[in-house]
Image: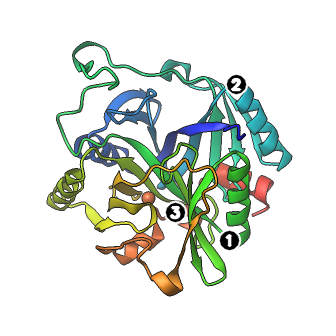
Amino acid sequence: MVNKLISQLASVEILTPKLDDTLWFFKDVLGLYEVGRKDRSVYLRGWEDWYAYSLKITEASTSGVKEITWRTYSEEDLYTAIKIIESKGLGLGWDNGEPDMGVGKGYKFMLPTGQVGKLVWEMKLWRASGNLRSGYRARPIKKPLQGVQAKDLAHLFVFAFDSNSLKSAVDLFKSLTWHVTEILKNGDQILTYWGAFNGTAHDMAIGLDPSGIPGRLNHLTFNVDYADDILRAADLYSDYDLEIVGGPIRHGITDSHSLYVKEPGGNLIELLHGGYINVVPDWEPVVWDTKEDENRWLYYWGHVKEAFWDGSPVPKDKVDPELRELIRQKLGK
Ligand SMILES: [Fe+2]
């Protein structure tokens, strides 16, 4: 018996130096709903995200990821997960949550790859009221009338600054019951892992970063409802002068349709359609090897631009000072 500790990726907080332009991208082009504002942060959701928000955007001097939040299966599982994290010396302590957004207290920790994660149990399901309440009874809010109508948060891809941090992060997440679905190798060297807590082909990927800077984001991804939405997005992106960095493509890994764009704040954002479901208990991760498969793991058909490989760039001198200090304390980097 496996007691799953974590149910899902619940939300991601990203940074942007151009808050208004980034909001135009996520609200007008992707079609996410704004559900709240606090200080220099704005909370957004897709029409089929279950909790109040899945994306928090905070104004900063740089782009990148600030905090990644997962929900546990129960309160007991939260404390079990904290014990595992603390045994590895990665705990950062509690915050008070965001009760006005339906999110209770959270336990923060440092990923071995330098990003800040958070585990939460108390999280309220969210439902629209009034005119936006949907007649589809499972749907939390009506589909928006504008943009690409991005559905919900799918996954994020974080960078590991070296092979040891990659291995330690994967070991940590496996001990938190993350299910590795696919692996990319270059001969003997493992470059990237894909896996999921939630039974999808992946809700997170962790891959080696040639820049060696801790805490970086490669990209953040939302699902779309129809495969055609990928084409509609490519059309809108090109019409509104947004830089398409990759696609439309079909991934070899996870077998899904995909499109990558740079949002105006510099973060790499993917739209995804399809991909398999995998809850096979004795699944052995699928292995891709760049020597044999070249880049077919990324684009079985289609292509990506050179800028794809850099993800969401954060110059070394722009890493948030608070994050840099936490990384120094916890990882000695
Ligand atoms: Fe992705």
The residue at the far top in this view is 130
Q: Residue furthest right?
A: 87
CA gap between label 1 and label 2 equals 34 Å
Q: Earlier in the sequence, mark 3 or mark 2?
A: 2
Residue type at tag 1: Asp
Q: Earlier in the sequence, mark 1 or mark 2?
A: 2
* Placement of the N terminus among the 4 image quadrants: top right
User: In the rendering, which numbered label is found on residue 162?
Assistant: 1
- Residue 170: give x, y in percent of width and height: 68, 58
Q: Quadrant of the C terminus?
A: bottom right
Against 312, residue 124 (above or below) is above
Q: Secondary structure at mark 1?
A: loop
- Asked if residue 319 shows in the view, the reply is no
**Would you say the residues marked 1 and 2 are in contact, meaning their CB atoms lie under 8 Å apart?**
no
Q: Which circle, 3 or 2, is nearer the viewer?
A: 2
The quarter of the picture where residue 191 lies is bottom right
Q: Which label number is shown at residue 276?
A: none
Identify the residue position indicated by label 2 in the image. 75
Write down which quadrant ligand 1 falls in: bottom left
> Picture coordinates of residue 125 (x, y %)?
47, 22
Q: For this view, does 269 lie left or right of residue 27?
A: right
Amino acid type at circle 2 is Glu
Q: Which residue is mark 3?
A: 314
Give 17 or 84, whichever is nearer the viewer. 84
State the CA–CA distance, disc 1 to disc 3: 16 Å
Q: Is residue 11 left or right of residue 130?
A: right
Q: Is residue 188 left or right of residue 146?
A: right
